[in-house]
Image (cartoon, rainbow, N blue to C red):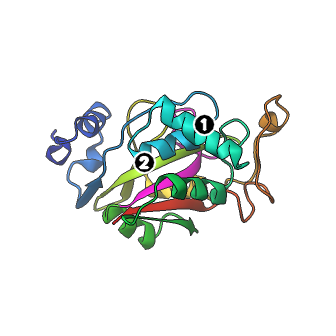
């Protein structure tokens, strides 16, 4: 078993061989932008994912993002449940003539997203986490953010390459599964709402027009 295409990226090669991902042996197309990893502390997954896209995911960077988000009333404790607030924060820190950022509304498993990733685009995507941190289905109760910085097209399927703040390794998921998870973010967990920690929610909740359901952020490095 060999994954010659992945050998230039040790973390990718390790993932493919360790988990015997035979379905990825001979991809038709492959695109990947390496991002640095950073483990989150508390409800700051969105800030960590954004810092990864900035190329400087340090504790100082996370704190700077948090202070800005809190000052602008985007968050109380680091949580980011509004797609519009998350996009505004991304535009403030990923500014410049060589970067274009916009919100994508709709089902992720589409030609638009596949072509965007194959062209080198990066995404910030909210989804529900399963126990192994892969995309799950909990109606938004386990909402989390990931940075998508690559893709793998095979004869049978389309995969995305992700990083997020809960693990050190990259993750490889089917785009369809991530899309299904992203489209069922309907409510914040009652346990979170009833907890002593206060969360900043958008008007209309996470399923509303300012929320996370069927929404993601596209970042194009021109």
- Which residue has dot 2 on it? 53
Spatial distance from mark 2 to mark 1, Cα to Cα? 15 Å
Left/right placement of residue 83 relative to residue 28 reads right
Q: Which residues are magenta?
A: 121-139
- Which residue has dot 1 on it? 44
Name the residue: 26% across, 33% down: 14
Left/right placement of residue 15 relative to residue 2 reads right
Where is residue 222? Give x, y as percent: 33, 66
Q: Secondary structure at mark 1?
A: loop
Residue nearest the viewer, comparing 109 with 61: 61
| Circle on res. 4 | none
Q: Is residue 138 visible?
A: no
| Quadrant of the drawing holding the N terminus | top left
Where is residue 169? Give x, y as percent: 38, 33
Residue nearest the viewer, comparing 176 with 151: 151
36 up-or-down from 219: above or below = above
């Amino acid at each position: 078993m060999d994954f010659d295409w992945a050998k230039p990226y040790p973390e990718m090669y390790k993932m493919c061989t360790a988990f015997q991902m035979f379905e990825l042996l001979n991809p038709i197309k492959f695109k990947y932008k390496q991002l640095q990893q950073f483990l989150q502390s508390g409800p700051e997954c969105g800030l960590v994912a954004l810092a990864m896209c900035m190329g400087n995911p340090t504790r100082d960077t996370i704190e700077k993002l948090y202070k800005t988000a809190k000052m602008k009333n985007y968050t109380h404790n680091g949580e980011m449940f509004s797609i519009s607030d998350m996009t505004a924060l991304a535009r403030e820190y990923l500014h410049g003539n060589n970067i274009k950022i916009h919100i994508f509304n709709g089902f992720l498993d589409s030609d638009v997203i596949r072509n965007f990733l194959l062209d080198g685009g990066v995404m910030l995507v909210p989804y529900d986490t399963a126990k192994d941190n892969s995309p799950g289905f909990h109606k938004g109760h386990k909402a989390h953010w990931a940075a998508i910085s690559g893709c793998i097209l095979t004869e049978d399927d389309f995969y995305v390459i992700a990083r997020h703040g809960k693990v050190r390794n990259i993750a490889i998921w089917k785009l369809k599964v991530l899309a299904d998870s992203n489209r069922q973010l309907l409510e914040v967990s009652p346990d979170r709402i009833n907890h002593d920690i206060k969360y900043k929610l958008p008007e209309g909740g996470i399923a509303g027009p300012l929320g996370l359901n069927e929404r993601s952020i596209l970042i194009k490095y021109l």
